[in-house]
Image (cartoon, rainbow, N blue to C red):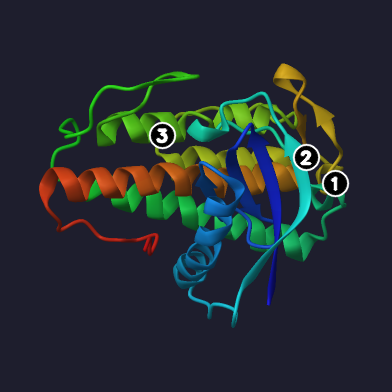
């Protein structure tokens, strides 16, 4: 089965998104390195969803974007061509349910960390400042994109409560707009293009990338005992 991929790159540094598996991604120092990881990522993603992985997954690049962003640190602004299509209500509900499952699983992982302020990770700087090291820092960073993502498509959300509570509240606010399923393309902050489809995909991706960092940090810091709720390989 072909896995349609969107390739965003800055020089040789690459990030690949699986276009039909919202939130699934790989990174690598080269395109080939990212491509080699995709089959494993799809297997992990499908296990997390409780669905079978496709037979003989073969990544195929269907869209490319050269970027000036720090894609090696997971900065991204690409809008998939397919993310410009209007949404049917049933498809929206399925994607929303997946974004809420992702938030719930991230919260479950966070709450399972033995010491929320302890980490073996070294201090490191990226384009947005210091990389979150502890579970508390990772959780706050991941939760606090809620108002940003919803705001980019015109919904005045907030970051109050848990990651699940504020995300659920943001969707409720969004659904109060009569035309939200039109999936209009909006020009947001930093001249980045956004749609509702992109927001749904970005929530799952953002949870997944920082969930993986939190899970690996916990294994290295505490030596195990933390549930692999996202089914990372």
Q: CA distance from mark 3 to mark 2?
A: 25 Å
Quadrant occupied by the C terminus: bottom left
What residue sits right under mark 2 in the picture?
195
Secondary structure under tag 3 reads loop
At 85% from the left and 36% from the top, the residue drawn is 185
- Badge 1: few (under 14), some or many (20 or more) residues near its Cα, within 10 Å? some
Is 137 on the left-hand or right-hand side of 31?
Answer: left
From the image, state whether disc 1 or disc 3 is nearer to you. 1
**140 vs 86: above or below:** above
In the rendered view, does 190 fall on the left or right side of 167?
Answer: right
Q: Which mark is residue 161?
A: 3
Q: Residue at x 32, y 53 (%)?
A: 108
Question: In the picture provided, is 64 more to the left or to the right than 221?
Answer: right
Residue 117 placed where, x, y %?
Answer: 18, 30
Query: In terms of sequence position, does the residue under pointer 3 or pointer 2 come before the other?
Result: 3
Asked if labels 2 and 1 touch by Cβ distance under 8 angstroms, the answer is yes
**Marks 1/3: CA distance?**
31 Å
For the image shown, how many numbered marks are present on the structure? Answer: 3
46 up-or-down from 202: above or below: below
What residue did someone put label 1 on?
Answer: 84
């Amino acid at each position: 089965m072909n896995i349609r991929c969107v390739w965003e790159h800055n020089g040789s540094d690459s990030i690949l998104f699986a276009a039909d598996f919202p939130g699934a991604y790989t990174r690598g120092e080269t395109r080939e390195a990212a491509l080699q990881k995709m089959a494993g990522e799809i297997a992990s993603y499908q296990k997390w969803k409780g669905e079978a992985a496709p037979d003989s997954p073969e990544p195929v690049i269907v869209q490319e974007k050269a970027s000036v962003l720090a894609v090696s640190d997971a900065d991204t602004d690409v809008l998939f061509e397919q993310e410009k299509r209007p949404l049917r209500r049933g498809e929206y509900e399925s994607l929303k349910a997946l974004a809420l499952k992702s938030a719930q699983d991230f919260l479950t992982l966070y709450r399972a960390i033995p010491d929320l302020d302890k980490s073996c990770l070294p201090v490191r700087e990226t384009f947005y400042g210091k990389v979150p090291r502890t579970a508390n820092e990772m959780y706050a960073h991941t939760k606090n994109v809620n108002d940003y993502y919803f705001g980019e498509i015109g919904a005045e959300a907030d970051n109050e409560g848990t990651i699940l509570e504020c995300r659920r509240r943001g969707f409720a606010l969004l659904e109060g707009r009569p035309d939200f399923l039109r999936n209009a393309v909006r020009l947001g902050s930093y001249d980045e293009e956004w749609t509702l489809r992109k927001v749904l995909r970005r929530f799952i991706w953002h949870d997944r990338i920082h969930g993986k960092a939190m899970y690996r940090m916990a294994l290295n810091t505490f030596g195990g005992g933390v549930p692999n709720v996202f089914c990372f390989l």
